[in-house]
Amino acid sequence: NKRCALLIGKHNSGSVPGKNYMEILGRPAVEYPLLAASHCKQIDKIYVSTDSPIIMEIASGFGAEIIERPAELARAESPTEFVFQHAYEIIKKKEPELEMMALLFANSLDVLPEYLEKGFQMLDDNQDFDAVVSVCQYNMFTPLRARRLNSDSTTEPMLALDELGIENAFDRDAMGDVYFVDFGVQVVRPERCLRDPLAGSLPFRWLG
């Protein structure tokens, strides 16, 4: 059974222009996830979906196979689910024995080969899992502290705090430990996650 990596990255970014290939500590940003994938013992082949000629050139240096990303999937509002699905539909024709995939973002600088290998191993050990994803603990960003900005420049809680009945809602540990997906590692069973990417759980439906 084959295991591949799929990296996605646009040429233009609305948040930080050129962030996917901007130089970070002497390397273009996209080189870091490519290095991790190329040194991961579990990954047989790397695919890269992009509309960027710069990313294409960098990825080709790692032996990656390029999937040209259509313009309608390279906009700021293009759903990530559809970007992954488009590439998967192409990859599965080339890799009929495809079993698992590591999904990478071009600006995932902190991913390491051993993290990816652990993700694959966790799926091997847990056949009921659709995906493995890395998370970070940020209790200070508990949902109890989230606020909405109103048109008159005032703010109000995102949650109906009075109805929750939580004492000391200002306490960052009031909800226990709070974890956020950080996307450093995403390893999925593509047939479960990407064949119908809208069938997964919100907000990251491509994770099954």
Image (cartoon, helix red, strand yellow):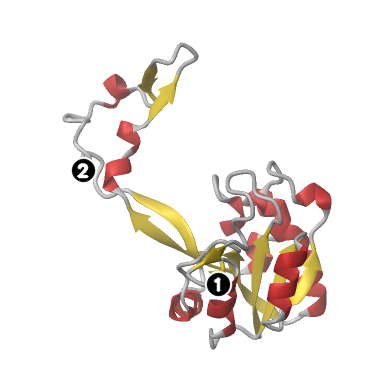
Q: Single out the residue that lies furthest toward the bottom.
A: 41
Amino acid type indicated by mark 1 = Arg
Horizontal side, residue 181 vs residue 103: left or right: left
> In the rendered image of this protein, does residue 206 appear above or below residue 129?
above
Q: Nearer the viewer, residue 39 or 81?
A: 39
Horizontal side, residue 144 vs residue 94: left or right: left
Where is residue 63 shown, x and y percent of the image? 71, 83
Check disc 1 and report the residue beneath it: 27
Q: How many marks?
A: 2
Q: Nearer the viewer, residue 147 or 62?
A: 62
**Mark drawn on residue 73:** none
Q: Nearer the viewer, residue 185 or 124?
A: 185
Mark nearest the camera among 1 and 2 is 1
Q: Residue at x 79, y 59 (%)?
A: 69
Where is residue 174 shown, x and y percent of the image? 21, 39
Looking at the image, do the residues carrying marks 1 and 2 touch, with CB atoms under 8 Å apart?
no
**Mark drawn on residue 173:** 2
Q: Earlier in the sequence, mark 1 or mark 2?
A: 1
